Image: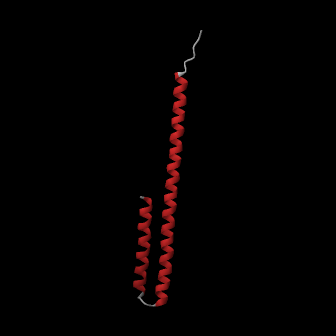
Amino acid sequence: MTTLKTPGWRSAVGTLAALGLMALSGAALATQQAQERREGRDAKQDAKQEARANKVDCKAADQKSNAECRQDKRETKQEGREEKREIKR
């Protein structure tokens, strides 16, 4: 009588299961990273739009010099960059 040797099959199935789980966890990580990038990009774009609007308002109000309005815009954009860095951490 011949007996089947199942340890080879068990090992192959275990290996395939492990590879499948690793692939799923990699996909979940990629999805999380993509979401973080998207949120960071959105934060930076929002800061840029806010900076533009602030500069236009600043120039229209004529309360500050053009150089001071530019500096305000730079500071607003820098805050957006910092927010993006915080999101990615």
In the picture as drawn, the residue positioned furthest to the right comes out as: 1
Quick check: 64 above or below 48?
below
In the picture as drawn, the residue positioned furthest to the top comes out as: 1
Point 53% across, 44% down: residue: 24
Residue 33: x %, y % from top left: 49, 54
Quick check: 17 above or below 84?
above
In the picture as drawn, the residue positioned furthest to the bottom comes out as: 62
Q: Quadrant of the C terminus?
A: bottom left
Point 45% across, 90% down: residue: 62
Please tell me how many numbered marks the rendered image carries: 0
Residue 37: x %, y % from top left: 49, 59
In terms of depth relative to the viewer, which is nearer, 11 or 68?
11
Q: Quadrant of residue 67?
A: bottom left
Point 44% across, 70% down: residue: 80
Quick check: 8 above or below 45?
above
Quick check: 59 above or below 36?
below
Q: Quadrant of the N terminus?
A: top right
Residue 66: x %, y % from top left: 43, 86
Point 49% across, 73% down: residue: 48
State how the image is colored: secondary structure
